[in-house]
């Protein structure tokens, strides 16, 4: 359960960033270079694109191991459909996440499926971060202390959970980025730390192919 929650927090932050239809990049106030960079401005910036794809590198620092565990692969995020997370190293694992289902394909060809109605705690995480990137900060303020710094080109968002179950697992969640979310760090209470870098991100083609749409037909 812990490992799956960590994974969902990792990829759902990425998945929900383009979850709202494109909006204006700035308001008149945001054009003022002296105006503070707000959570609303960040939400507008991250929600411009209907499709984002790229590569990821994940480094997991475990207190019980001297060397970190590393993995990498590629991802596809589509606002209308969900997330396709394809790990290629050190072994192949595919995870497909939609609004109410999660499918995991393992190296031996077997599949594991989760439905939101049967696993409300797990899917709570995706809806939690969806609230952030849809500008619903009231919902998040009940469970996090939030601190945003920087500007549109280089920003950092720190979330400190204040209630269970999140504060029993994570001491802090940190996001860094610019045009996109570029890095995510999950600091666990027990000392373990996960860092995910998102690289070579692109927004074209903006429409999925038939083959890509079929991935999300769970």
Image (cartoon, rainbow, N blue to C red):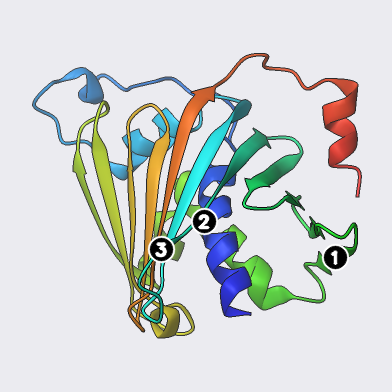
Q: Give me the C-alpha separation between circle 1 and circle 2.
A: 19 Å
Foreground pick, 218 / 20 = 218
Q: Mark 2 highlights which residue? A: 10
Quick one: 28 or 90, which is closer to the camera?
Answer: 90
- Tell me the residue at 67%/66% (across/down): 123
Helix, strand or loop at label 3? It is loop
Figure quadrant of residue 112: bottom right
Q: SS of the residue at dot 2?
A: helix
Q: Is residue 192 above or below residue 159?
A: below
**The N terminus lies in quadrant:** bottom right
Lower sequence index among marks 1 and 3:
3
Between 171 and 63, the one nearer to me in the picture: 63
Q: Which callout, 3 or 2, points to the residue nearer the camera?
A: 3
List x then y, in percent, for residue 203: 57, 19
Q: Which residue is mark 1?
A: 113
Residue 61 image point, x, y percent: 38, 67
Q: Residue at x 91, y 43 (%)?
A: 217
Mark found first going from the N terminus, 3 or 2: 2
Image location of residue 197, percent across then percent down: 42, 43
- Badge 2 crowding class, 10 Å Cα cut-off, few under 14, some 14 to 19, many 20 or more, is many
Task: Quote the CA–CA distance across marks 3 and 2.
Answer: 17 Å
Using the image, determine if residue 20 lies above or below residue 122.
above
Mark drawn on residue 122: none
Residue 130 appears in view: no
Q: Within 10 angstroms of label 1, few (less than 14), some, or many (20 or more) residues?
A: few
| Residue 198 picture location, percent across and down | 46, 38
């Amino acid at each position: 359960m812990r490992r799956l929650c960590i994974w969902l927090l990792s990829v759902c932050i990425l998945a929900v960033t383009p979850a709202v239809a494109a909006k204006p990049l700035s308001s008149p106030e945001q054009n003022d270079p002296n105006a503070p960079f707000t959570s609303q401005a960040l939400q507008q910036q991250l929600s411009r694109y209907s499709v984002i794809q790229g590569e990821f590198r994940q480094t997991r620092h475990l207190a019980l191991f001297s060397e970190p565990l590393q993995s990498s692969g590629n991802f596809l995020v589509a606002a209308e459909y969900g997330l396709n997370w394809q790990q290629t190293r050190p072994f192949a694992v595919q995870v497909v996440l939609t609004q109410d289902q999660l499918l995991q394909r393992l190296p031996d060809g077997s599949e594991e499926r989760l439905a939101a109605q049967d696993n409300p705690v797990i899917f709570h995480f995706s809806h939690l971060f969806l609230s952030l990137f849809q500008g619903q900060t009231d919902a998040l303020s009940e469970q996090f202390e939030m601190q945003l710094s920087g500007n549109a080109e280089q920003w950092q968002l720190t979330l400190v959970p204040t209630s269970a179950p999140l504060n029993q697992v994570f001491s802090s969640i940190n996001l860094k980025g610019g045009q996109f979310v570029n890095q995510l760090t999950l600091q666990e209470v027990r000392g373990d730390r996960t860092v995910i870098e998102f690289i070579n991100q692109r927004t074209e083609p903006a429409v999925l192919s038939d083959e890509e749409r079929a991935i999300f037909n769970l």
